[in-house]
């Protein structure tokens, strides 16, 4: 807390000595959305040539200009460096608290979305592709943990949003094709959609992977009994 108290007046001192206005060229290069993490966005925009940001529900964060390419963001307690090469991105200025880790936020292409944004927009194929890209880059990323995705799917079911649950379970199956549990969940979603053929197919797939999956056994017996 003390570090924050000391750093803020220092940043304000820098800002007071620097014009907060930015050039048109800089504005054009830096305006846009940056990947803060694999599924979260930091958006940079300008009002009266002064830099602002949208982040985590706050749509009007004013950044303090330190120099022509460096800005202080109080909400992060970080100095952000805007770097144009090899591609436009944001780097956090190094400091002891980072423990040697370098933070790099890539600028997103126009119209690009995060995996979660694609899913919310019901662009499910693109959402699946985006989640698979996250897995390819970092297979241990908390955003793609199997049990978390599965749990979210059942939350949709409890809210009677079975279509969303089905699509999310499909994504989980694409991420974890060797998991008995994901096919069991997918089978349940098809069952709720009254799609018996696909429900049976997925319960069978679940049992092929783990013949002891009791829930899949129970549903399969129920659906195939004469």
Image (spheres, rainbow, N blue to C red):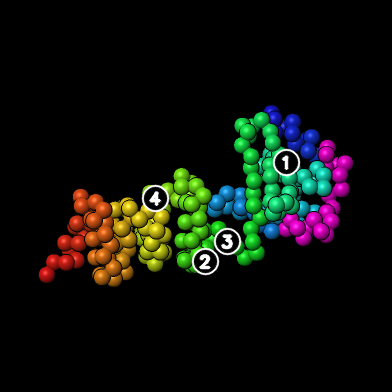
N-term-proximal mark, 3 vs 4: 3
User: 171 or 139, which is in the foreground?
Assistant: 139
Q: Position of residue 94 (x, y in %)?
A: 69, 36
Relative to 81, say whether 152 is above or below. Answer: below
In which quadrant will I find the C terminus? bottom left
Tag 1 near tag 4, CB within 8 Å = no
Q: Going by the image, does 48 lie left or right of 164?
A: right
CA–CA distance in space, label 3 to label 2: 10 Å
| Circles 3 and 2: CB atoms closer than 8 Å | yes
**Disc marking residue 113:** 3
Give SS at disc 4: helix
User: Mark 1 to mark 4: distance in Å?
Assistant: 35 Å
Q: Secondary structure at mark 3?
A: loop
Residue drawn at x 24%, y 51% as measured from the top left: 210
Between label 3 and label 2, give the one nearer the viewer: 3
- How far is the residue under mark 3 from the one under mark 1? 25 Å
Residue at (60, 62) in percent of width and height = 112
Quarter of the rendering containing residue 16: top right
State left or right for residue 186 relative to residue 39: left
Disc 3 crowd rating (10 Å Cα; few below 14, some 14-19, many 20+) is many
**Local crowd size for mark 2, using a 10 Å CA cut-off: few (<14), some (14–19), many (≥20):** few
Q: Which residue is mark 2?
A: 121
Reading the image, the residue beneath label 4 is 146
Q: Is residue 23 magenta?
A: yes
Q: Which residue is mark 1?
A: 79
Camera sees residue 59: no
The residue located at (62%, 65%) in the rendering is: 111
N-terminal of the pair, mark 2 or mark 4, is 2
* Nearer the camera: disc 2 or disc 4: 4
Q: Earlier in the sequence, mark 3 or mark 2?
A: 3
Over which residues does the magenta segment extend?
A: 13-31
């Amino acid at each position: 807390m003390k570090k924050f108290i000391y750093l803020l007046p220092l940043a304000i001192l820098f800002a007071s000595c620097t014009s907060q206005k930015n050039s048109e060229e800089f504005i054009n290069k830096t305006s846009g959305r940056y990947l803060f993490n694999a599924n979260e966005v930091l958006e940079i925009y300008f009002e009266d040539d002064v830099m602002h940001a949208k982040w985590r529900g706050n749509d009007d964060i004013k950044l303090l200009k330190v120099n022509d390419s460096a800005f202080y963001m109080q909400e992060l307690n970080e100095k952000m460096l805007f770097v144009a090469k090899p591609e436009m991105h944001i780097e956090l200025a190094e400091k002891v608290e980072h423990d040697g880790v370098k933070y790099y936020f890539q600028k997103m292409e126009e119209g690009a979305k995060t995996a979660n944004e694609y899913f919310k927009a019901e662009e499910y194929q693109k959402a699946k592709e985006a989640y698979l890209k996250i897995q390819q880059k970092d297979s241990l990323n908390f955003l793609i943990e199997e049990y978390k995705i599965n749990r979210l799917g059942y939350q949709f079911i409890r809210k009677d949003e079975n279509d969303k649950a089905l699509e999310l379970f499909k994504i989980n199956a694409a991420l974890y094709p060797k998991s008995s549990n994901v096919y069991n969940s997918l089978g349940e979603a098809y069952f709720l959609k009254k799609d018996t053929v696909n429900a049976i197919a997925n319960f069978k797939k679940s049992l092929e992977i783990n013949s002891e999956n009791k829930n899949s056994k129970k549903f399969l017996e129920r659906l195939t009994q004469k």
